[in-house]
Every structure is written in structure tokens, then in C-alpha cells.
Image: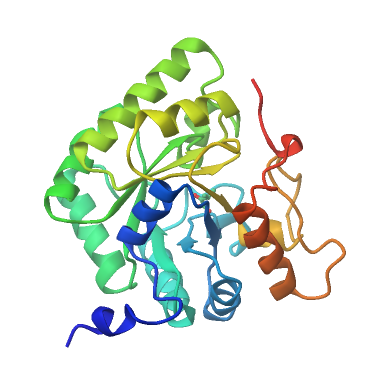
Amino acid sequence: MYKQLQQRGMESPPVNIGTLREMRQAREPIACLTAYDASFAELVDRAGTDVVLVGDSLGMVIQGLDTTVPVTMDDMIYHTRCVARGLRRAFLMADMPFMSYTTPPQALDNAVRLMQEGGAMMVKLEMGRGQVGIVEYLAKQDIPLCAHLGLKPQSVHKLGGFKVQGRDQQAAENMLEEARALERAGADTLLLECVPNALGAAIRDAVQIPVIGIGAGPDVDGQILVLYDVLGITRGRMPRFVKNYMTGRDSPLEALRAYVRGVKDRSYPAPEHCFTE
Ligand code: KIV
């Protein structure tokens, strides 16, 4: 009856939330990538990626938008469902889009849709201290949660651009406190985007849950990049933290395997991909 019990004996059983906790404990880097369709999901999975995120970055890389703000719940559900069909081993996380979690009941309805209609195993929300109550509410309903801190692209018009966050001492202390509060409220993982290395390390040490970084330095528990950036298909300017793994390689699968290897052996991120202050 319980398929997961049968899968335990497999050579590489599907990744679950317990696997992610064990990897943090064992200090084994967690390799994560985004995906938006079944064919790429299959490749990303075959490359050995531990976590696949259906990011609302699909607004930019699939829909050609300038920001993630116009992405809808229906968009997220459609792409999550496509990706779910391509995965065998990787853990599937999906973004809650802009303004889909403004109240606890709305957040719960939309998280349930992403899990039931899309097949997501965890939902990711861009969070601040003001939304701790939403995390608490969802956690009480056993919704697996990732809280996204640092640069929050859904707030781009409030931030005035895509900028490194937590650079001054006050902002860094606020973010540390937010991370602790979100863990206390029941977040299962954190995603940290574009913060200086030292803040990435301090947040990793301040919480017990896995911390995945994108432009957050080498000292977090895992790394994530947007799939198209890893494959050298970046629209516009390439962010500092991106590494194009297609360079010198013949196939997307080879490039994705090299990325996973780079995360696992900690050669990615190198100093040139990091923000030191
Ligand atoms: O939407 C997305 O792809 C993300 C990544 C930047 C991690 O949130």
C-alpha cells in the first residue's frame, strides 16, 4: 500500500523532506535546479538533482516577462503538473505566485491547489516578518513550506530593482531574526537569495532547517540556479552567481551533471559567484 516503503530499498530512493534534513545534518550539499516542463524535468532528475523547483521565474524564462509579478496560480499549477510527470527521484517544490498568500485561508487554498492539482511536495513563499502568521497557519495544517528570504523578486517594485540584500548591519540582523521567526513558525526549509556570504553562513548557523542559497555564498546547505542560466540561455545580463555549465560541453545532460557535481564537491559557487559584502 505505501509505495514509499517499497522504494526505501532502491539504490537511489526518491528524495523526501527527511532526506533533506539528513543531508543538512551530514553536511552533504543539496543540489537544486528549477524546471518548468516534463522533458527538462526528466533531464534534471537524471543528472542527480535533489530538489526541483517550479519557480515563478517561469514568468521571465518561459513567458518573456520582465518580472514574476504577473504570474498566476493557474500558470504555476500547469507547469508544476508538467514537471511532476518528468520526475522519478527529485523532491518537487513549487512557488506560490505574487499575492496568492495574503491571508491564511487564501494561502491554504492555494497551497492545497499546488499540491493536489500540481503534485508539489512543498510550497515556497517569499516571506518577511509580517507573514509569520501565514507560515504558522499553513504549518499547523501540515503544509510543507520553504520560506524565501533575501532578494524577493515578487517585491521588485518595492525594492527598486534586483539588488543584493542584507548588506548593512541592521538589514542583516533583521534577516537573521526573520529566519529564526520563520523556523519557529514551522518553515521546513529556507531559500536565501542574493545576500553576502557572511550573512548566508550566519543564517545557516542560526537555524536547524536546511538552507538553500542562490547567490548566498558557499556556506549554506544547498545551492539552486535557474535551469536556463546553467544551460547558457540567459535573457539579458547574467547575474554574478550564475555559471554557464554548457561551456565546453556537448549536451544539456552533461552540463546538468557537471552542475550537480560542482555543488556536491563544493567547487560551485566559486568566489567569483559570491557577494563578499
Ligand atoms: O523563481 C525562481 O526560480 C526562484 C529561484 C530564484 C530560486 O525562486
Q: Would you say 148 lies left or right of 63 here?
A: left
What coloring was used for the rendering?
rainbow
State the residue at coordinates (44%, 75%): 89
**Image quadrant of residue 219?**
top right
State the residue at coordinates (64%, 53%): 265
Which residue ends up furthest to the left in the rendered image? 140
x and y percentages locating residue 254 in the rendered image: 73, 72
x and y percentages locating residue 29 in the rendered image: 52, 51
Q: Is residue 103 above or below residue 196?
A: below
Which residue ends up furthest to the right in the rendered image? 248
x and y percentages locating residue 92 in the rendered image: 40, 66
Which corner quadrant holds the N terminus?
A: bottom left
| Nearer to the camera, 171 or 269 | 269
**Image quadrant of residue 40?**
bottom right
Q: Would you say 109 lies left or right of 175 here?
A: left
Total numbered labels: 0
Q: Is residue 178 above or below residue 106?
A: above
State the residue at coordinates (32%, 77%): 8
x and y percentages locating residue 222 in the rendered image: 51, 48
Which corner quadrant holds the C terminus?
A: top right
**Image quadrant of residue 34?**
bottom right
State the residue at coordinates (12%, 54%): 141
Q: Would you say 19 lies left or right of 106 here?
A: right
Query: Can residue 96 be seen by looking at this rendering?
Result: no
